[in-house]
Amino acid sequence: MIVVMKRGATKEQIKHVCDRIKDLGYRPHPIYGVERTVIGAIGDERGKVRLQSLESLEGVERVVPILHPFKLAGRELKKERTIIRVGDIQIGGNQFVVIAGPCAVESRDQIMSTAKEVKKAGATFLRGGAFKPRTSPYSFQGLQKEGLELLAEAREQTGLAIVTEVLTPEDIPLVAQYADILQVGARNMMNSPLLRQLGKVNKPVLLKRGMMATVKELLMSAEYVIAEGNSEVILCERGIRTFEEYTRNTLDLSAVPMLKELSHLPVIVDPSHGCGMRSLVVPMSKAAVAAGADGLMIEVHPNPEEAYSDGPQSLLPEQFEVMMKEIRRYLELEGKHL
Ligand code: PEP
Ligand code: MN
């Protein structure tokens, strides 16, 4: 339920409403807008009618239900867009972020040279998996701790912040020591123990859409993280499975404006996994800008032929540089900047 406070409601009145919400067994989420404060009362759906009684409290204008199941990720409670800050980078505002790097961290040379190249071309973040969620147990699973250390070294050398995946709740403390943003992969989007645990972390979470997940399911997964206290969630469209066979997945760009309509969270697009083909990455990146994305995630590898994973979809550093030049023009049209 949403408790809409009257314009000019006092701090004491707001606090009293929050206390009453707690007494009723719900969690208060006050949102202080320019005009007025609204307080979300979040908790068990059953028995929420009891919250209606708050309407009689001083300073309360009305109590209305939140219609969508994603209470905190949705826009009913919070209309203003969420801007996530990492150092001096802002995700979700007018700045457009580009997260670039190899699928997996493979060696010091590979990650250092990629980091330098993508930095030179204007990337905002360095990506690289240290823990890899592979379809086969016999495929390369990542350098793990050593991979994280190499990412940290690359950050030191280039100043690029790090985005890397965490696979299990147990790995969170280790990955959070090194990462600036923790990535949840498509295969883990519905792993609620992992999501809940990430809700207790003090770092942003990049949540990738599951390959068989609807937009609503993606938002419900974001809800798991936010409900535990971490409101810094970035949504990522990375393609879904359809009957189309030429592309690895079908990049659902309509999900971008859809998510922006339904949610206040930033949305980025990963055309590398979305299409699985190098030649489609640049055109789909431009389309993502036009669709209103807040950023891109792009796989770049110095030698894609030798890549341990996802070589066919990885751009060469020089191709990435051209891409960055090309998208600048599209960003200008959208009133955004790198
Ligand atoms: C990745 O980003 O390297 C990755 C494994 O992506 P996804 O989870 O979208 O398949
Ligand atoms: Mn990959």
Image: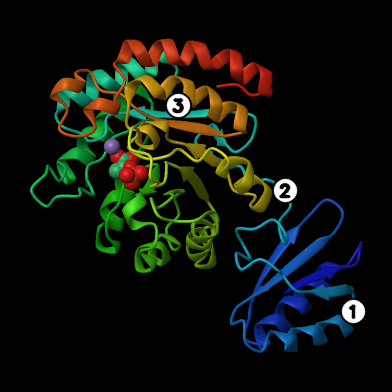
Res. 279 in view: yes
The residue under label 2 is which amino acid type? Glu
| Helix, strand or loop for disc 3 | loop
Q: Earlier in the sequence, mark 3 or mark 1?
A: 1
Mark 3 and mark 1: span between their CA atoms? 48 Å
Count the labels in the image.
3
Residue at 30%, 27% (x, y): give it: 313
Residue 291 percent location from the top left of the image? 61, 32
Quarter of the figure with the C terminus: top right
Residue 53 percent location from the top left of the image? 81, 87
The residue under label 1 is which amino acid type? Glu
The residue under label 3 is which amino acid type? Thr
- Vertical relation: 324 (above or below) 91: above
Quarter of the figure with the N terminus: bottom right
- Vertical relation: 323 (above or below) 4: above
Q: Give the camera-side residue of 188 and 77.
A: 188
Residue at 45%, 38% (x, y): give it: 251
Q: Is residue 166 left or right of residue 305?
A: right
Residue furthest to the left in view is 138
Q: Which residue is mark 3?
A: 124
Identify the image quadrant of residue 145.
top left
Q: Which residue is mark 1?
A: 58
Residue at 60%, 18% (x, y): give it: 330
